[in-house]
Image (cartoon, helix red, strand yellow):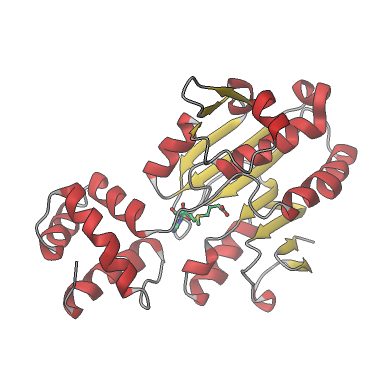
Amino acid sequence: MKTTDKEFFRIINYINKKYGISLIGKRALVEKRLDNVLTKTQCSSTDEFMDLIEKEEYELLDNILISEMLTNHTFFMRESSHFDILNQIILPKLKKCINQQEGIRIWSAATSSGQEAYTINMILQDYFGEEAKAWTMKVVGTDISQTMLDKAIAGDYTKEEMETVPDKWKSKYFIRKINGDYKINDYVKANIVFKKQNLIEPIFFDKNFHVIFLRNVLIYFDIGIVNKIVDKVADFLEEGGYLFIGLTEILDINSTKLKYIQPSVYRKL
Ligand SMILES: C[S@@+](CC[C@H](N)C(=O)[O-])C[C@H]1O[C@@H](n2cnc3c(N)ncnc32)[C@H](O)[C@@H]1O
């Protein structure tokens, strides 16, 4: 769908204001994705769609727009070096200094369709093994897209989406369906909560987290917004807690409350 300048800026300004995402240099992508938005909403033009969404603030329309326009690609074990750090450095430290009742809390912010949150939980289950049941463990997965959250909550993944899952995990933490696809089992689901959270809006949690994954989302925001989001997210880290960002993302460390540990890994000290 070719857009006029007016249509293009109308749509990207709306997304920028509401979600902080900058699509300014991505006109071809926006136009391609706009086709799907208009087909799904049965609108005949960008203006018709924008008139509806701006006047009525339809949640359904908004959800279609962001699910199409925002990049939500993810996969199990993505950037696995972070999970090695979790497994080999962070969890041994936490196990020593935290009691089982207080437990371990990890937030997967911008979790998309849940693979990141489930990977974290499978690492936790593997690490604690038999002791896992005695520990209070909570993984919270948040995203702005209800479509992605619905997929995360359902926990259904195609065999292609399962390609990066180790075989031992497939049998331990998933149920194989007749058609060869998989469903995450109830045990792994039990201590995960998925909920909607726009990172540019106020954030509320009753307790801070020991580890936060904020990966492969900062890249879509303007730098001023990145600093604000990172500061806000860091407020929900326990002292000594770790923040992971995407391997290709960087933070302006002078403007955050965090200490640089190594590329993509920060700590609140
Ligand atoms: C590329 S995915 C990253 C998924 C996962 N963290 C990973 O690294 O594989 C980016 C996600 O960020 C979400 N997102 C974009 N803007 C957001 C915002 N303002 N608040 C919360 N989530 C947002 C998108 O919906 C998308 O699911």
Work out whether 201 lies above or below 223. Answer: above
Q: Nearer the viewer, residue 268 or 212?
A: 212
Q: Is residue 252 left or right of residue 150?
A: right
Q: Quadrant of residue 23?
A: bottom left
Horizontal and vertical percent position of residue 58? 21, 48
Work out whether 130 lies above or below 66. Answer: above
Q: Quadrant of residue 136?
A: top right
Q: Is residue 249 visible?
A: yes
Q: Quadrant of residue 262?
A: bottom right
Horizontal and vertical percent position of residue 247? 66, 64
> Which residue is depicted at the point 75% across and 21% down?
133
> Which residue is depicted at the point 80% across and 44% down?
87
> Which residue is depicted at the point 53% across and 41% down?
161
Q: Nearer the viewer, residue 151 or 91?
A: 151
Q: Quadrant of the C terminus?
A: bottom right
Work out whether 243 lies above or below 159. Answer: below
Horizontal and vertical percent position of residue 90? 82, 48
Horizontal and vertical percent position of residue 242? 74, 55
Say how many tags the image has: 0
Q: Is residue 210 left or right of residue 130?
A: left
> Which residue is depicted at the point 70% across and 37% down?
166
Seen from this angle, which residue lies furthest right?
96
Q: Quadrant of the N terminus?
A: bottom left
Q: Nearer the viewer, residue 258 or 181?
A: 181
Q: Is residue 236 visible?
A: no
